Image (cartoon, helix red, strand yellow):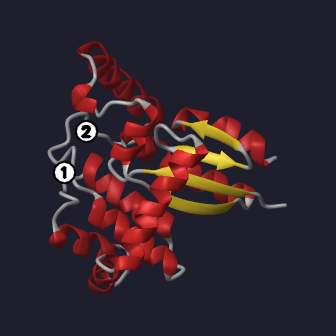
Amino acid sequence: MARRVTVYYALQSPWTYLGWQRWRDLAARTGAEAHYRPIRMAPVFAASGGLPLAQRPQQRQAYRLMELERWRHHLGVPLNLHPRYFPVDEAGGAAMVIALGEQGGDVARLSQAMMAAVWAEERNLAERATLLAIAAEQDEDGAALLEAAAGTAAQAAYDANTEAAIRAGVFGVPTFQVGDELFWGQDRLDFVARALQ
């Protein structure tokens, strides 16, 4: 029987990007009922005591880069350790993803394209032209999605996703929730798979 998995994530998270295709493969293999919840990380950090990257101690920043390099080689996923457009205001892209989900579209595919834009393609998610181009490449109506993204419903859903994440105990992304159990990080996907068995 398929089980519901709530996926809390941010489009500019390198860890979400590194694990995304493996998550999509796992969801397809298990028939998981995936519910995608893009969230704002600033309120999550504020609620959980986390720090934005630039405010973390140098040791932690340096170790993050080592881990990203290890994982990109281990997984064979293209990833620029110092992307040109990071950090980036991803709110418009996240709202587009939410709007697509409301229409029953392929949220996972569009999300992956936006993540790749940041981490592999040196594209700016804060630019309208970039968002329109990414949507078109995924055979989606970017203009309609941007219009829906600017509406109150998409923005309210973005905030609601963030509040739900905080209530659930999320403190980082990606976090996969199966039942009452949280799995933080792309390196926990094996445990997600076991929870779905």
Q: Position of residue 58 (x, y in %)?
A: 23, 16
Would residue 174 appear left or right of 52 to someone viewing this image?
right
Looking at the rendered structure, the kind of residue marked 2 is Asn
Q: Are marks 1 and 2 in contact (CB under 8 Å)?
A: yes
Residue at 24% from the left image edge and 69% from the top image edge: 131
Residue at 19% from the left image edge and 56% from the top image edge: 123
Residue at 50% from the left image edge and 72% from the top image edge: 106
Residue at 55% from the left image edge and 33% from the top image edge: 187
Furthest-top residue in view? 59
Report which quarter residue 13 is drawn in. top left
Would residue 94 appear left or right of 174 to someone viewing this image?
left
Q: Quadrant of the N terminus?
A: bottom right
Report which quarter residue 48 is drawn in. top left
Residue 145 position (above or below residue 64)? below
Q: Which of pointers 1 and 2 lies earlier in the amino acid sequence?
A: 2
Q: Position of residue 47 (x, y in %)?
A: 43, 38
Mark 2 sits on what residue?
80
Q: Position of residue 31 (x, y in %)?
A: 73, 61
Nearer-the-camera pick, 91 or 74: 91
Mark 1 sits on what residue?
122
Would residue 130 appear left or right of 113 to someone viewing this image?
left
- Residue 120 visible somewhere in the drawing: no
Rounded to the nearest angstrom, the CA distance separating label 1 from label 2 is 8 Å
